[in-house]
Image (spheres, rainbow, N blue to C red):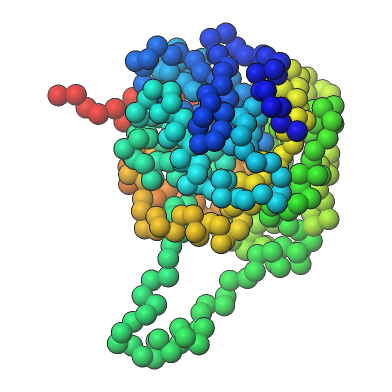
């Protein structure tokens, strides 16, 4: 589905000052990037998109950051858009889609661009998690972190003090498998309510089949998907969830906690905006031309490469083997979190935002942007640009 020659694709409708180009030989990939403000001396801001997006999602933000004196780069991540060289399909080796490989991809790309450090790393949605792992594992390379929409929970913990040398009774309990059985199986709990979690749905073979389609079908899908997670949909009124329990997760909209028998396309079709909503609300930040770009790109690539990232998240074996070595580490660079006020993404992991001060040793209080949903960099571009630049300025080393 991906072309052998990505340079034969039609030009993207980019704002003035943004250039599209390809960077070959990066961890077996040819990366597609968008860049603005390059002169070889300016500090680098690197932007990592989420799902189901591409580098194009940053088109409105990039000129504002470049005008402030930065070299700004956004890439199509592995499995997405016009970046090629990754193996497509459901039955492929998932190792290249793990977070440690994501860090490696970014370090290698930045090095190829002629930079030894990234001044500020900004990640949105899934890209926020990749960005957080970059900052946690290479604080020497990634000097600041801004997480958008998706808060980072930190590395997984390892079993601790499970082999005491003195307390024989405790050791016997552990050997017999004594453990806290109070936590419900979240999937069984949701199924009893006729529901399922979107991340595990995205990890199924069927998800890519359900969402893929012709360009016209995908135009309809993306218009609905972007609408239902934006501030334009009046049912996006996030509330704090008290625990990781089915009864609490069921408070979220169907695009997070889906009806058991539904596909994501079914969920999208149930909340499609009217023509008036598209004209009056959506077109303010997402034009028909923009929707056509997403549909064009995903009609060519499908969704499986992007969905393979979810499969490494939900597969505990892959997850543990990849990042357990970082257990106990914290993000040591200046970090902050920003999200739209109408974005359920900041609530989907109960307590995660509140714990960011523990996960990050140099954390700046989060910024919640009014009149923005999940797509903060597209819905409230100017407000986000000011918040990003203010954070950078406030964390600059003090001069003597």
- Look at the image and tell me in which quarter the C terminus lies: top left
4 left or right of 363 in image: right
Question: Residue drawn 56% across and 21% down?
Answer: 22
Q: Which corner quadrant of the image does residue 69 belong to?
A: top left
Report whether residue 210 is seen.
Answer: yes
Q: Nearer the viewer, residue 361 or 106?
A: 106
205 left or right of 240 in image: right
Question: Residue drawn 34% across and 15% down?
Answer: 41
Report whether residue 378 is seen.
Answer: no
265 left or right of 226 in image: right
Question: Residue drawn 45% across and 45% down?
Answer: 133
Vertical placement of residue 350 versus 303, above or below: below
Counting from the top left corner in percent of width and height, residue 198 is at 70, 51
Q: Nearer the viewer, residue 290 or 189?
A: 290
Vertical placement of residue 347 versus 249, above or below: above
- Look at the image and tell me in which quarter the N terminus lies: top right
In the rendered image, the residue lying farthest to the top is 16
Vertical placement of residue 137 versus 52, above or below: below
Counting from the top left corner in percent of width and height, residue 216 is at 85, 27
Q: Which corner quadrant of the image does residue 82 belong to?
A: top right
Question: Residue drawn 30% across and 87% down?
Answer: 166
């Amino acid at each position: 589905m991906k072309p052998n020659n990505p340079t034969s694709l039609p030009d993207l409708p980019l704002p003035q000052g943004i250039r599209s180009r390809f960077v070959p030989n990066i961890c077996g990939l040819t990366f597609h990037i968008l860049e603005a403000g390059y002169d070889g001396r300016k500090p680098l801001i690197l932007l990592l998109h989420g799902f189901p997006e591409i580098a194009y999602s940053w088109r409105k933000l990039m000129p504002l950051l470049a005008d402030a004196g930065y070299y700004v780069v956004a890439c199509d991540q592995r499995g997405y858009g016009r970046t090629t060289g990754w193996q497509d399909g459901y039955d492929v080796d998932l190792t290249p889609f793990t977070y440690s490989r994501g860090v490696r991809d970014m370090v290698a790309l930045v090095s190829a661009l002629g930079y030894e450090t990234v001044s500020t790393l900004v990640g949105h949605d899934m890209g926020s998690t990749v960005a957080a792992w970059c900052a946690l594992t290479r604080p020497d390379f990634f000097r600041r972190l801004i997480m958008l929409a998706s808060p980072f929970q930190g590395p997984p913990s390892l079993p601790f003090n499970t082999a005491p040398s003195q307390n024989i009774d405790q050791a016997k309990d552990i050997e017999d498998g004594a453990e806290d059985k109070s936590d419900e199986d979240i999937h069984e709990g949701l199924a009893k309510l006729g529901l399922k979690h979107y991340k595990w749905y995205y990890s199924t073979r069927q998800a890519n089949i359900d969402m893929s389609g012709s360009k016209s079908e995908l135009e309809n899908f993306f218009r609905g998907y972007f609408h239902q997670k934006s501030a334009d949909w009046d049912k996006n009124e996030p509330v704090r969830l008290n625990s990781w329990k089915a009864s609490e997760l069921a408070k979220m909209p169907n695009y997070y906690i889906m009806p058991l028998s539904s596909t994501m396309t079914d969920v999208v079709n149930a909340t499609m905006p009217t023509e008036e909503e598209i004209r009056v609300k959506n077109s303010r930040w997402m034009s028909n031309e923009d929707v056509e770009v997403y549909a064009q790109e995903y009609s060519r690539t499908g969704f499986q490469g992007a969905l393979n990232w979810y499969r490494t998240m939900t597969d505990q074996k892959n997850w543990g083997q990849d990042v357990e070595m970082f257990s106990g580490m914290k993000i040591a660079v200046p970090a902050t979190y920003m999200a739209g006020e109408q974005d359920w993404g900041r609530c989907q992991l109960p307590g995660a935002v509140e714990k960011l001060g523990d996960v990050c040793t140099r954390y700046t209080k989060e910024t919640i942007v009014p009149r923005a949903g999940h797509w903060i960099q597209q819905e409230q571009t100017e407000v986000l640009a000011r918040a990003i630049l203010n954070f950078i300025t406030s964390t600059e080393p003090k001069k003597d």
